[in-house]
Image (cartoon, rainbow, N blue to C red):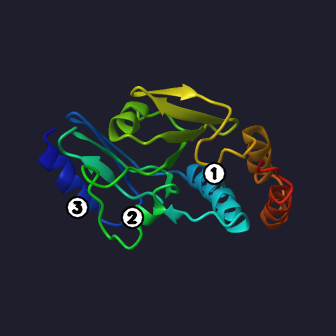
Amino acid sequence: MPWSFYEDVLAAADDRALRVTFDEGTIEMMAPLPLHEKWKTRLGRLIEAMSEELDIDIEPLGSATFRREDLSKGLEPDECYYIMHADAVRGKDELDLTVDPPPDLAVEVDITQRSIRREPIYAALGVPELWRFDGLHLNLLLLRDGTYYPSATSTVFPFLRMSEFESFLLRLESERQTSVIREFRTWLRTLDFN
């Protein structure tokens, strides 16, 4: 499909709960399932609680569409955040990724099978950190030389022990969320930042 068709689909979708991925002429449209939305919201709650508790300035952009016609690529992350570049995008209603930086962190919940691989699109757009959750495990990927590699350490939250973060995330499935979030905030206060 031509880029103009992708733009038409985005315009027609407007504010509907529809994820549209475009990669060099191939287009995929998906409507998120409730299970998908539960996990993406849980991840977002933890990230935002962490930023509040530790006074880390972030600019959350949720599932905003990120696209570059010159690369013939576009997508909507499940959640995304500007952290190191929060000041660069604050107050902007529209972003141009040929000028503005990409999000510092994108979150993908991969509960269902997709026909288009999204990692190469994120890599082409220059998103430095990607968190992928498959319903059981949270994987942290860092961009290096145009490819994502697994990492145990986040660059946007270098103090964060991802295994413990993952355990709080998984607890949100079976325990009262407010209790888990409260305990998560208490745990964050014990972290050593040296």
Residue type pointed to by label 1: Trp
Task: Measure the C-alpha gap from mark 2 to mark 1.
Answer: 26 Å
User: Residue 164, how many percent across, how many down?
Assistant: 80, 43
Q: What quarter of the picture does the N terminus occupy?
A: top left
Q: Tell me the quarter of the picture where residue 56 sits.
A: bottom right
User: Residue 122, how many percent across, how many down?
Assistant: 40, 39
Left or right of 150 in this view: 193: right
Q: Residues within 10 Å of mark 3 (few under 14, many from 20)?
A: few
Left or right of 87 in this view: 184: right
Q: Tell me the quarter of the picture where residue 188 sits.
A: bottom right
Task: Classify 52 as above or below 35.
Answer: below
Circle 2 or circle 1, nearest the eye: 2
Residue type pointed to by label 2: Val
One can see residue 156 in this view: yes
Q: Which residue is mark 3?
A: 11
Q: Which residue is mark 2?
A: 89
Q: Residue at x 53, y 51 (%)?
A: 33
Element carrying mark 1? helix
One can see residue 111 in this view: no
In depth, the one of 188 and 165 nearer the eye is 188
In depth, the one of 52 and 17 nearer the eye is 52
Q: Which residue is mark 1?
A: 39
The disc, 1 or 3, on the residue closer to the chain's N-terminal end is: 3
Most distant residue in the front direction? 194
